[in-house]
């Protein structure tokens, strides 16, 4: 870098004194400084990359040393299994795919949400109360909210049942999404079950980040796992499924999220009306209700109040 600056100064002086070219001297000096700065940036980048590569080589050397040290007939099979696991793992990653356990699943999501620039498209199929009862899911909700605060457009389709959404505890996550500028929509399981091909893709839920990488939920031998993929065919398949789900959302193009939520509450209320007649009638016989009837009265009253809240905030 010093040589570039010195050269620029000398050339500038030559142009200035013998030829009296002040403008050209200033331009040469400016270019010299710019070249020096660019050279410094490139140098620092190269140095950083070299340090990373050296660190990687050191790790590989450490792995080889440890492999050699394990020279015991009682442990050699276990050593070979460990090496095979590493080879299989790296082979997956080289093909732009990875299978992760539950803890890695959430850590990876956290790092990706921090890096996300534009949009998050997600499908949730879990019991809605899990967002609050499971600490990791609750932290995941906070990450969604933080991403939205930084300008990321978060759109999530909740695939659920009418029975689940009768409970205000299960509707809470929908309200919190709207409250925090996330964009929820509700889809009924009973509707998409007719589309077997689509169901196979969406049944466990997934998250697509900036339309470039997808994490899909999966279950393997009872352990909750996730599959991360940048394979174009897989990513496009999930993007297509997300778009296909839109046709199962009531009035998706014509109503706001609040209006669609009000419509969902009306549907749930009509189900209660079919079963009990009217809420006033149910209240009049409250003393005679069994446990189910009392719970239904509570849920019905809460969804009516919730509909009023949505209507007030439209």
Image: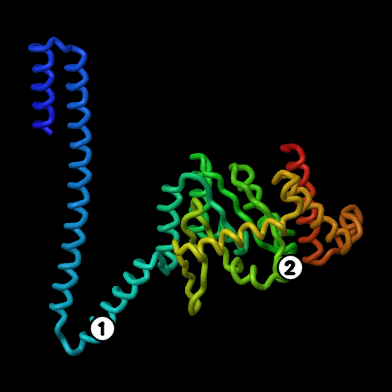
x, y percent for residue 167: 71, 58
What is the secondary structure assignment of the residue under circle 2? Answer: helix
Q: Residues within 10 Å of mark 1 (few under 14, many from 20)?
A: few
- For the image, the number of numbered tags is 2
Q: Which residue is mark 2?
A: 190
4 relative to 75, above or below: above
Q: Position of residue 6 (x, y in %)?
A: 9, 26
Q: Nearer the viewer, residue 254 or 154?
A: 254
Quarter the C terminus occupies: top right
Tell me the quadrant of the picture where the N terminus can be found.
top left
In the displayed image of the protein, which residue is found farthest to the bottom?
73
- The answer to which image quadrant residue 92 occupies is bottom left
Q: Callout 1: helix, strand or loop?
A: helix
| Residue contact at pointers 2 and 1, CB within 8 angstroms | no
- Residue lying furthest front in this view? 19
In this rendering, the answer to whether 98 lies above or below 40 is: below
The nearer-to-camera label among 2 and 1 is 2
Q: Which mark is residue 78?
A: 1
- In the rendered image, residue 34, in percent from the top left (x then y), is placed at 22, 29
The residue carrying pointer 2 sits among few (fewer than 14), some (14 to 19) or many (20 or more) residues within 10 Å by Cα, namely few
Residue that appears at 59% across and 50% down: 155
Q: Residue at x 74, y 59 (%)?
A: 166
């Amino acid at each position: 870098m010093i040589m570039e600056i010195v050269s620029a100064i000398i050339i500038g002086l030559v142009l200035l004194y013998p030829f009296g070219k002040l403008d050209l001297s200033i331009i040469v000096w400016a270019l010299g400084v710019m070249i020096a700065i660019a050279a410094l940036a490139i140098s620092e980048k190269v140095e950083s990359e070299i340090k990373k590569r050296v660190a990687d080589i050191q790790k590989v050397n450490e792995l080889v040393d440890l492999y050699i040290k394990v020279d015991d007939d009682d442990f050699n099979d276990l050593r070979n299994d460990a090496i095979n696991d590493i080879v299989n793992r790296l082979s997956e990653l080289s093909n732009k795919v990875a299978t992760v356990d539950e803890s890695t699943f959430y850590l990876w999501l956290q790092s990706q949400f921090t890096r996300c620039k534009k949009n998050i498209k997600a499908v949730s199929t879990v019991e809605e109360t899990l967002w609050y009862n499971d600490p990791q899911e609750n932290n995941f909700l906070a990450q969604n909210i933080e991403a939205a605060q930084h300008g990321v457009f978060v759109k999530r389709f909740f695939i659920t049942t009418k029975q689940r959404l009768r409970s205000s505890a299960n509707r809470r996550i929908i309200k919190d999404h709207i409250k925090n500028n996330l964009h929820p929509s509700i889809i009924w399981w009973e509707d998409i079950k007719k589309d077997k091909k689509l169901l196979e893709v969406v049944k466990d839920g997934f998250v697509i980040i900036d339309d470039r990488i997808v994490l899909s939920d999966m279950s393997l031998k009872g352990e909750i796992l996730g599959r991360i993929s940048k394979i174009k065919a897989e990513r496009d398949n999930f993007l297509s499924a997300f778009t296909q789900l839109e046709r199962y959302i009531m009035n998706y193009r014509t109503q706001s999220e609040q209006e669609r939520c009000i419509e969902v509450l009306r549907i749930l209320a009509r189900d209660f009306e079919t079963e009990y007649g009217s809420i006033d009638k149910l209240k009049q016989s409250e003393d005679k209700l069994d446990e189910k009837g009392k719970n239904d009265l509570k849920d019905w009253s809460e969804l009516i109040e919730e509909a009023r809240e949505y209507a007030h905030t439209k």
